Image (cartoon, rainbow, N blue to C red):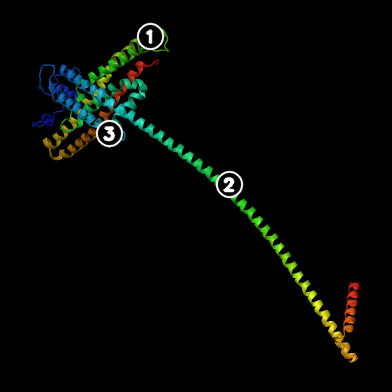
Amino acid sequence: MNLLVQTSTDDGTFHGPSIMEFFPDIILFEGTGFDINRIMLIRFLAVLALLVVFWLGTRNMKIVPSKFQSLIEMALDFVRVNIAEDLLGKVDGKRFLPILTTMFFMVFTMNITGIIPFLNIAGTSVIGVPLVLALISYVTFIYAGMKKSPGKFWKNSLFPTGVPWPVYIIVTPIEFISTFVIRPVTLTLRLLMNMVVGHLLLVLFFAATQFFVVTLGGWFIPLGGVTLAFGFAFTLFEILVALLQAYVFTLLTAVYIQLAVAEEH
Amino acid sequence: MLHALVAAAEEGATQNPLIPATYDIVWSAVCFAILLVFFWKKILPKMQTMLEERSAAIEGNIAKADEAQRQAEAALEQYTAQLAEARQEAGRIREAAREDGKQIVTEARSQAMVEAARVTAGAQAQIEAERQAALVSLRSDVGTLAIDLAGNVIGETLADDAKATAIVDRFLAELEASEKATK
């Protein structure tokens, strides 16, 4: 990461991390719509890693699994059993399993690059991935509802049962906004902001460490130790966040699908 | 934290992080598409196949175990039946042996009694025979003795006298007769 050098320059003042962290220079295809910068490369790397790991893990599947296969099975079963089948049941769970599995592993892998040395930034910390996935989630749950029964879907979404009809004047717009506007927006922003803030925090701690130890030195070095310790702690925390955000994103998508195909709320 | 964000934004943010760039969307979609196809067409079917095979294998093993248990139970039943039969057989044999023993004892006893009776009869016959012999010899001895005695008394030899012999014989016969009469 060259940002450590950038953020604490030799002029003796501290420079915090900037939002431009997330918009590094374009390396290839500038201005074509297929521009590639460092974060795009990290995303490609994440995709490649997933392809390789899962290809190796399922290349030669045995009924009695090897250690590596058990690990892969555990990961796949986590999405299959704990998210898809738990919320959607066996039949619908199987239908939407590819999307949910892809979402979970894509989000997790692109999150975890945030703490991998030399990558140091999450592939999900730029709005593209969260937005695209949120839109896919949005389209998927609307598709699920429409396919099952359009009438029921709209009724359940906009006119919840057990409410006297005049209340619909207030409830229906609220339900519309919450279901069809808030859902994709919160999905996008929750993931994006978690990753952006996580990255900024880590940069802040490590830049401060560099500033205290290298730029100021002397009596400030112990302070650098403190910020380093914080940086380390938050690195561990980021692992949890990476997993949790992937889980939350996938779980919410499953919940939205479940609500869309439900008979009655 | 907020301060840092604000400071960061002030320092030279020329880009709004909430407005996606075209390439960002394009590459995100490409990544998702690749992974979706990969998981959908390759990984999940493989996983499904493996899970089905595994459950089939487990069910097969359960069926096999059931079969083995059934066989074991049948064998146990058979052994139990055989054991009971053997016990019955042993009881029967014991009973028969007891009967046989009893019979043998009875036979031996009756044989012994027959033998004893035979021995007793033989002994009695012998005794009778010896008594007869003794009687006969006694009679002749008593005759001779009496004649000798009488001879000595009268001072004459009466031994070859037929008359004397006849007298003795008569006397003895009378003796015998009186003996019989007293009996």
Q: Which residue is mark 1?
A: A168
Q: Which residue is mark 3?
A: A69
**Mark 2–mark 3 distance (CA, rounded to whole Å):** 61 Å
**A257 is higher (above) or lower (below) than B102:** above
Residue A15: x and y in percent read 13, 28
Judged left or right of residue A157, residue A128 is left
The circle drawn on residue B107 is none
Describe the element under mark 3 as helix, strand or loop.
helix
Tell me the subunit letter for badge 2: B
Q: Which residue is mark 2?
A: B88
> Residue A53 occupies which quadrant of the picture?
top left
Q: Nearer the viewer, residue B179 or A98?
A: B179
Seen at 14% across and 35% down, the residue is: A210
Q: Are marks 3 and 1 in contact (CB under 8 Å)?
A: no
Position of residue B48 relative to residue A136, above or below, is below
Report the mark closest to the observer, 3 or 1: 3
Classify 10 Å Cα crowding around label 1: few (below 14), some (14-19), many (20 and above): some
Pointer 3 chain: A
Image quarter of residue A37: top left
Give x and y (percent) for residue B123: 74, 70
Categorize mark 3 by other alpha carbons within 10 Å: few (<14), some (14-19), many (20+): some
